[in-house]
Amino acid sequence: MAAAAAVSGLVNVLESYRGRDRVVRKLCYSCQLLGGVMSNKSEVDHNWGKSLLVVASQLSHCRTVLRLFDDLAMLAYSVNYGLGKKEKDPIIRWISIFSNISDQLYYPCEHIAWAADSGVISAKSEIWWTASTAFWGLSLILGIVKYVS
């Protein structure tokens, strides 16, 4: 009975985009961690570690491709928030505005990097990956600052 409830719960999680992304992200990071640790061990563990790192890479790529469809949702969120006039705290308001701008810039940079890596466009992807990572990092930092404020 408990197994059936667990399976049912997992199915419910996997039926939503956010739930599926969370599961894929956790699997990706777990494979990266275990693969990294196992790659430094014996020959058998090393081979398993390499395989787990390949799985992690594919899961990461999967998440990147799925994020190609997040632009409109992020744009709708940013437009809905606007200049945060409903926000009572001006510091939180400005942090949120800059966070939204960072998020809005993150997506096209990542898309261009993906398109360059995939051969869809002719561009150097490294610059775009660096920019997308910088915007993602800025967004994380602003989220932390907002949380502690």
Image (tube, grey):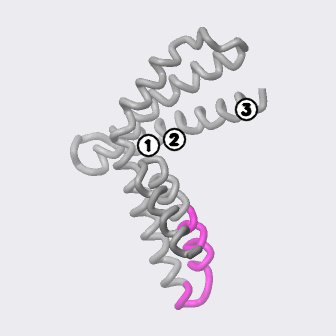
Who comes first in sequence, dot 3 or dot 1? Answer: 1
Local crowd size for mark 2, using a 10 Å CA cut-off: few (<14), some (14–19), many (≥20): some
Q: Which residue is drawn at 47% across and 25% down?
A: 77
Type of residue at label 3? Tyr
Q: Mark 2, mark 3: which one is toward the viewer?
A: 3
Q: Is residue 118 left or right of residue 142?
A: left
Magenta stretch: dominant secondary structure:
helix
Q: Distance between the residues labelled 3 and 1?
A: 27 Å
Residue 30's spot in the image, x, y percent? 57, 66
Type of residue at label 2? Thr
Q: Residue at x 36, y 48 (%)?
A: 66
Q: Which residue lies furthest to the right in this view?
A: 148
Type of residue at label 1? Trp
Q: What element carries label 3?
A: helix
Is 38 magenta? The answer is: yes
Res. 133 mark: 2
Is 17 magenta? The answer is: no
Q: Residue at x 65, y 16 (%)?
A: 93
Q: Nearer the viewer, residue 43 or 123?
A: 43
Residue 141's spot in the image, x, y percent? 66, 34
Q: In this view, does 28 lie above or below 119?
A: below
Segment colored magenta = 29-45
Q: In this view, does 104 lie above or below 93?
A: below
Q: How far apart are marks 2 and 3 (CA)?
A: 21 Å
Q: Do the residues labelled 1 and 2 touch (CB within 8 Å)?
A: yes
Q: Name the residue under label 1.
A: 129
Q: Name the residue under label 3.
A: 147
Q: What element carries label 1?
A: helix
Q: In this view, does 94 lie above or below 4?
A: above
